[in-house]
Image (spheres, rainbow, N blue to C red):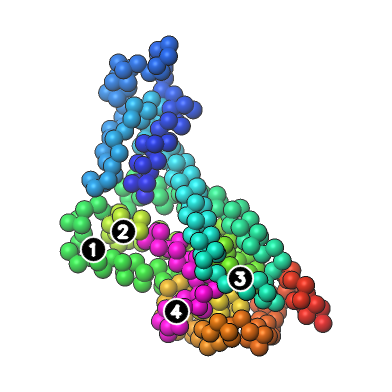
Amino acid sequence: MDIALELCDTFFFDYLYSAVLPAQPAPYLLKNGFGNSTIEALKVASTWQYSPASKYLSWTPRDAAWTSQLPRDNAYRQFFSLFLIMWLAGALIYFIIATLSYVYIFDKTTFKHPKFLQNQVRMEISQAVHSMPYMSALTAPFFLAEVRGYSKLYDAPSEAPFPWYNLLQFPLFLLFTDCFVYFIHRGLHHPSIYKTLHKPHHKWIMPTPYAAIAFHPVDGWAQSIPYHVFPFIFPLQKFAYLALFLFIQIWTVFIHDGEYVANSPIINGAACHTMHHLYFNYNYGQYTTLWDRLGGSYRKPNEELFSRESKMGKKEWERQCKEMEEKVLEVEGVDDRSYGPVAEERKTK
């Protein structure tokens, strides 16, 4: 994350902190702000000296990098900057990927499903937007520890433990996070915490791509912990880390988009995750079905989901609704969701 922080510092944060907390004393020239001699004096006096985050990609600091009371290496400044990056950049990525999926992939026939909620898309977006700043604040300490040098992130491929590790880090990351997300996710279904933390995400029986991060903030943060812990345990190349961060966002949208492409006994795709949203206590995994199989929680997706005609057919929907209504009473005690008119009529019978 130090690469992203350097980028944002150079083009935004240096100017923000210089304006809000200018260096003291501030001997301004009449029109030109800090004089050249003053800038040079501030550079000499500064406890912070520029060192690029990566030898492959860096940005030369502008004068504003030295004209604030908070130098770039100030921990409080770094925390607040990382919080904003996580919040705003995360929101931008979420809206771009979810919207592209919603427009070009998501099957709008889902709107007619008996368990699709009234105003669901708006509610998914509202919950996600509400949770983002809290999840970002909880995540920022991990990023702060990274940029302050406590992780095992490395820059040059030659710094890897051995040459093949530059390739092996990808499956290792996926296996590690898949395992621990499974146990965290399954733990969130424990009756003592499910209704408080995880039920908000299970409000969406038939989710859209916008449900990808429509969580209670502690729930969303808890399930992200393995991603942030990994580089403190295992070496991880900096650009690989950024690429994997983007991949996670895409995958999270992918498993909520309702396009059942991966009919695989190994991949925990959208079909598997739909089984989870419908029937609650199955398919907790993130990428694969491995840990669900080992933990006895794997449920094979209905074959009907892989045919466009049958997955949106009345017979399949009725079967889903019948079992879902039994499961929701078992897990939640009462179904307090507000469905569309047809479903509400069915619910009152």
CA separation in Å, label 2 and label 1: 9 Å
Percent x, y for residue 241? 34, 57
Earlier-in-chain disc, 1 versus 4: 1
In contact (CB < 8 Å): disc 2 and disc 1? yes
Percent x, y for residue 286? 45, 72
Earlier-in-chain disc, 4 versus 3: 3
Quarter where residue 180 is shown: bottom left
CA separation in Å, label 2 and label 4: 25 Å
In the image: residue 180, left or right of residue 305 = left
Q: Residue at x 45, y 79 (%)?
A: 262
In contact (CB < 8 Å): disc 1 and disc 4? no
Percent x, y for residue 147? 35, 46
- Find the magenta span and give its range: 244-271
| Comparing labels 1 and 4, the label whose residue is closer to the camera | 4
Label number found at residue 108:
3
Q: Is residue 123 above or below residue 51?
A: below
Residue pointed to by mark 1: 166
